[in-house]
Each structure stands twice: as C-alpha cells, then as structure tokens.
Amino acid sequence: MSMHRYLPALLLCCAFAVPACAAESIVFAVTAENHLPIADIQGETLRSGLLKDIGDALAMRIGRKPEYRVLPSKRLDAALTAGEVDVACNQTPEWRSAALIWTAPLFQDRGWLVVRTSRPPVRKMEELAGKRVGMVQGYVYVDPPPEVQARLERDDAPSMRANIEKFLCGYNDYALVNELSFRYYLKQTGRVVAIHPPLMQPIFEPACGISPRSRISAAKIQRAAADLVAEHAMSRLLERYR
C-alpha cells in the first residue's frame, strides 16, 4: 500500500500537534520590578523566588508546564486582558484595573511605615504631611489614604528593594515597606537599623489574577490555588523566605 494514501492524514496530525503541545503550558506574568523574596529576575528569566515557587506548584497541580514572562508593571493589565499571559500571582483586585478572575488569597502580608529613631515616632498617617516618604513607583497605596498622600512628598524608588536600600542608607527617614520584603532583606544582608516599632498598615492578601482569555479553565486554577493553601503547601513555601 502506497504511503501517499496516508500523507494527508499525517499532515493533518502534524498540523494539530504544535498547538496541542503549546497548550500544555501555563504562562505566568512576573513584573520586572520584583526582587527577592518575591522574584529573582536575571535579564528576561525568572530564576527563583516566591512567584516561581507558587507558579511551579500551581502548574504541577494543574498538569501543565510553567512558563514565566517578565513584563513591566504598566504592561501587566493589558497582557492579562489580551490573554498574552494566563495568570499573575502576588496581586490583589485593588492593584489591578483589568477585569480579572481571582483565586482565593494565598497568604497574608502587611505594609509597614518604618521611621528612623533620629526622628520622632509616627503614631498615625496624618503625621506624614510635609515629610518625604520612601515609596515604590507604580504601587497603589490604599493606606495612607489619598488625602494624606496629597500632603506628603512621595519619593518613589523603582522597586521595593531599592526603597528599602534608600531607607537603610539614610536617604529617607520614613518609608512604606512590605513586612515580608523588609524582614527578608535584613535577614539576608545582616543589616542593622535603628527604627521605631513599625506603624502597622492593614493586612493585605495577595492572590492570583486569571486572564478572562486564559487558555486554562479559571475554575481549575482556582481549585489548584485553594489546594495549595488547604494542604499547607503555601505555608511551607513562605517559610523559605522568613
């Protein structure tokens, strides 16, 4: 029997093979401004960090191969809306303007206002009026409220790590930091800084925002995220950075 009779069928199988293979991945967005403990990014590659740990764990539960696309923060909403990426983790609905599908929260973190002991302690956010405060470019701050932010001098750093470093070097006497990142940086570097007890901000609960055009069922991703928490795997991942 001639092979020519099988050629159309063979070509048809090949035509569908590439999309099928491509669909086996799940693409996570990682914003380029991140540093450890959230992400160790070298060039366009995510090497390690909490975002990679979360993505690897979710992909394993879903049965997909994880891929990571590094994007500027200002491109994230558009990429999710267009379906260029499937998921972005370590996000909250308050931080994103895109209409996304959300998983349950994965963990808790908290903002800290840190103040050097060379300055009087700050007991409420209103006392920041007129002061230069280290913050992060592009971050959406719920606290301090807009009316307070309008009366302080916002000194934006390109990343949370840069914000912490500027504070520790004495460039700013006041800074808004995340507890997880601040503790991690001090632990890894051995740096010591004299600060007042941090003024605690409301707890926030990062989750994963799913693109409405995700190639993977949103319900499947939501179940995987819920399992990650219920099985205490998320707690074990966090312990690596505490």
Image: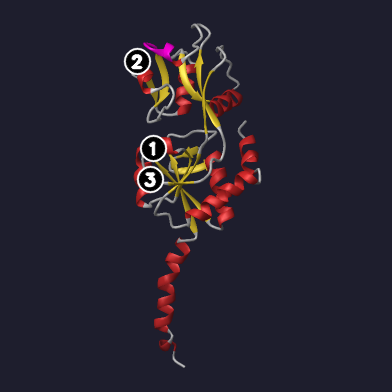
Q: Please indicate whether residue 155 sits to the left or right of residue 61 in the image.
A: left
Disc 1 residue type (three-letter): Ser
Mark 1 = which residue?
Answer: 73
Which element type, helix, strand or loop, lies under badge 3?
loop
Q: CA distance from mark 3 to mark 2?
A: 31 Å
- For this view, does 236 lie left or right of residue 95? right
Looking at the image, is 169 positioned above or below residue 184? Answer: above
Residue type at mark 2? Arg
Give the answer, above or below, for where 99 lies relative to 40: below
The residue lying toward the viewer, choosing from 53 and 225, is 225
Say which residue label 3 marks: 99
Identity of the amino acid at label 3? Answer: Ala
Q: Earlier in the sequence, mark 3 or mark 2?
A: 3
Q: Is residue 41 above or below residue 210?
A: above
- Report helix, strand or loop for mark 2: loop
Residue lying at 60% horizontally and 46% vertically, measured from the top left: 228
Question: Which residues, given as a range, are shown in magenta?
Answer: 126-131
Circle 1 packing at 10 Å, graded few (<14), some (14-19), many (20+), is: some
